[in-house]
Image (cartoon, rainbow, N blue to C red):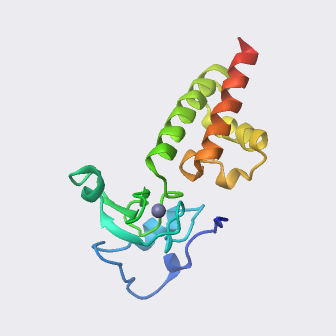
């Protein structure tokens, strides 16, 4: 599945009241304007193509979690993604448990590399990672990775760390 990364949501410049999809209490124009690399709210699951619902994240965590406690969740495979605060925009690609695990593991390796090689500067390290993976910097975020991409990112970072040892 190809997921398009778009620019700032045109609704951020709308003059009329924005409608918020249930169960969101509102959608903020100012918050929409802050999201520079946007992907559309999912209508079909990014993992399995199943039906997606916008839910309270208590559905996932057992209680509401965080200041904007909502998520897009697939009723079929359970993949989910959180929302940018005060918007209906997803933080990234919906992910199943194994994908979330793969992203976490890869990100830990990446963060170690950021400290060792980039003096804690994540933007330079992300630019390097995008080149190493052959992808556009706009989609080079762990929240955007599929399981395969996350595993490749982890491997690339691991090799880079070993090359320095
Ligand atoms: Zn699914």
Q: Quadrant of residue 7?
A: bottom right
Is residue 98 depicted above or below 39 in this figure?
A: above
Image side of residue 123 versus residue 133, left or right? left
Q: Position of residue 106 (x, y in %)?
A: 57, 34
Q: Residue furthest left?
A: 63
Which of the pair 159/6 is nearer the observer? 159
Q: Quadrant of residue 73?
A: bottom left
> Measuring 36% from the left and 70% from the top, which residue is drawn there?
54
**Which quadrant would the N terminus be assigned to in this image?**
bottom right
Which of the pair 122/129 is nearer the observer? 129
Q: Which residue lies furthest to the top in this view?
A: 165
Image side of residue 17 versus residue 66, left or right? right
Is residue 4 depicted above or below 104 in this figure?
A: below
Q: How many labels does the image show?
A: 0
Image side of residue 6 versus residue 49, left or right? right
Is residue 51 depicted above or below 37 in this figure?
A: below
> Measuring 70% from the left and 50% from the top, which residue is drawn there?
137
Q: Where is residue 109 in the image (x, y as percent from the top left)?
A: 58, 28
> Measuring 37% from the left and 71% from the top, which residue is drawn there?
53
Q: Where is residue 130 in the image (x, y as percent from the top left)?
A: 73, 44
Image side of residue 48 versus residue 65, left or right? right
Q: Position of residue 151 (x, y in %)?
A: 62, 38
**Which quadrant would the C terminus be assigned to in this image?**
top right
Is residue 154 depicted above or below 95 in this figure?
A: above
Which of the pair 76/56 is nearer the observer? 76
């Amino acid at each position: 599945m190809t997921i398009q990364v778009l620019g700032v949501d045109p609704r951020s410049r709308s003059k009329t009241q924005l409608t918020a999809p249930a169960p969101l209490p509102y959608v903020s124009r100012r918050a929409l304007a802050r999201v520079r690399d946007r992907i559309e709210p999912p209508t079909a699951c990014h993992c399995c193509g199943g039906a997606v619902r916008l839910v309270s994240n208590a559905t996932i965590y057992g209680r509401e979690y965080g200041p904007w406690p909502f998520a897009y969740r697939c009723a079929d495979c359970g993949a989910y993604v959180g929302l940018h605060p005060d918007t209906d925009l997803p933080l990234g690609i919906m992910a199943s448990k194994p994908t979330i695990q793969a992203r976490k593991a890869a990100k830990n390796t990446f963060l170690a590399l950021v400290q060792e090689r980039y003096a804690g500067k994540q933007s330079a390290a992300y630019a390097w990672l995008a080149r190493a993976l052959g992808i556009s910097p706009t989609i080079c975020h762990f929240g955007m990775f599929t399981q395969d991409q996350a595993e490749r990112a982890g491997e690339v970072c691991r090799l880079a760390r070993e090359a320095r040892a």
